[in-house]
Amino acid sequence: MKKKDDVNYTALGVSLGPAFGVVFGLLFDNLALGIALGVALGVAIGAGLDNQKKNEK
């Protein structure tokens, strides 16, 4: 049986982005900005990976 690779990278980026953003926010002493940047970068990178995966098919 073949495994289906259905990974939604945008959702993965949205969930992991804030986790990394909190770390950077604590390092730079600005937690709110870190979370916001983490979400933004997570969405951007996830959307790019989703688009790349879609173009490969």
Image (cartoon, rainbow, N blue to C red):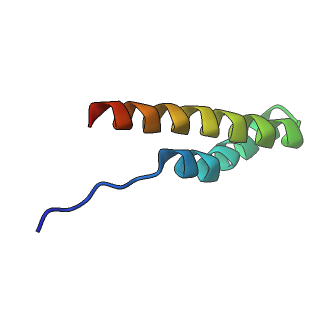
Given residues 39 and 5, the one toward you in this image is: 5
Residue 24: where, in percent of width, then height? 73, 36
Residue 8: where, in percent of width, then height? 47, 51
At 88% from the left edge and 36% from the top edge, which residue is drawn? 30
At 56% from the left edge and 52% from the top edge, which residue is drawn? 11
Given residues 41 and 48, the one toward you in this image is: 48
Residue extending furthest toward the left: 1
At 85% from the left edge and 42% from the top edge, which residue is drawn? 31
At 39% from the left edge and 31% from the top edge, which residue is drawn? 52
Q: Horizontal placement of 48 versus 25: left or right? A: left
Q: Horizontal placement of 51 versus 43: left or right? A: left
Q: Horizontal placement of 41 versus 9: left or right? A: right
Give above or below for 26 relative to 28.
below
Give above or below for 13 relative to 28.
below
Q: Quadrant of residue 56?
A: top left
- Name the image quarter holding the N terminus: bottom left
Give above or below for 5 relative to 22.
below
Q: In which quarter of the image is residue 27?
A: top right
Residue 16: where, in percent of width, then height? 60, 49
Residue 39: where, in percent of width, then height? 70, 42
Residue extending furthest toward the bottom: 1
- The total of numbered circles placed on residues is 0
- Name the image quarter holding the C terminus: top left
